[in-house]
Structure formats: C-alpha cells, structure tokens
Amino acid sequence: MCYTPFDTCLARDKHIMLRTCIMRDSGDIDRINEYQKAQLVKRDKPAHGVLRRWNRISTIVFSESDPSWGLYL
C-alpha cells in the first residue's frame, strides 16, 4: 500500500484506478493504541442502534477529532 490519505472515496478510487502507487512502509500512519483496541473489543450492543454504535466507535477511534464531522457520514 502507498498509505496515501484521501478526503473522499472518489479521490481514493481514482488513485487506485491510476495504478501509480509507490509501495512504502507504513511509517508514521495513525493507528489505534492498546487502550482504544481494548475499548473496541468490548461487546457490541446491536440493540443500541446504528447511530449510537457508530458514535461509540468514532468517539474511541477519533477521540482527538472534532465530533461534528461524523454528522456528514
């Protein structure tokens, strides 16, 4: 993988179709830490509904981000 971040799915798809990626090591890409992994592994509760479940995941994974961006997914 080239590990290029994309703002949109369309930009990512165009990049893939060009097949011009230069393969590289993952380097300093963002990853989840052990605490986040432990939180994500906890039992999911489908009864809470999709929105509440997504909010739980996004709060764990993107804890340092502005939560308002999730409203547009």
Image: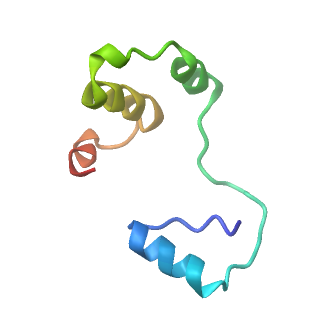
The N terminus is located in which quarter?
bottom right
Question: 8 or 47: which is nearer to us?
Answer: 47
Which of the two residues, 60 or 15, is positioned nearer the viewer here?
15
The number of numbered discs placed on residues in the rendered structure image is 0
Residue 73: image location, x then y, percent: 28, 50
Q: Along the horizontal axis of the image, is 69 left or right of 34?
A: left
* Display coloring: rainbow
Residue reaching furthest to the front: 47
- 4 in relation to 68, above or below: below
Q: Tell me where residue 33 sits by quadrant.
A: top right
> Going by the image, does 43 lie left or right of 46?
right
Quarter location, residue 45: top left
40 in relation to 30, above or below:
above
* Residue 62 image position (x, y, % from top left): 42, 38
Residue found 67% across the figure and 86% down from its top: 20
- Between 33 and 54, the one lying in front of the other is 54
Residue at (52, 19) in percent of width and height: 39
Q: Position of residue 25 (x, y in %)?
A: 78, 62
Taking the image as shown, residue 73 lies to the left or right of residue 31, namely left
Residue at 49% x, 74% y is 13
Residue under the image location 66 percent in, 83 percent down: 19
Residue 47 image point, x, y percent: 31, 14
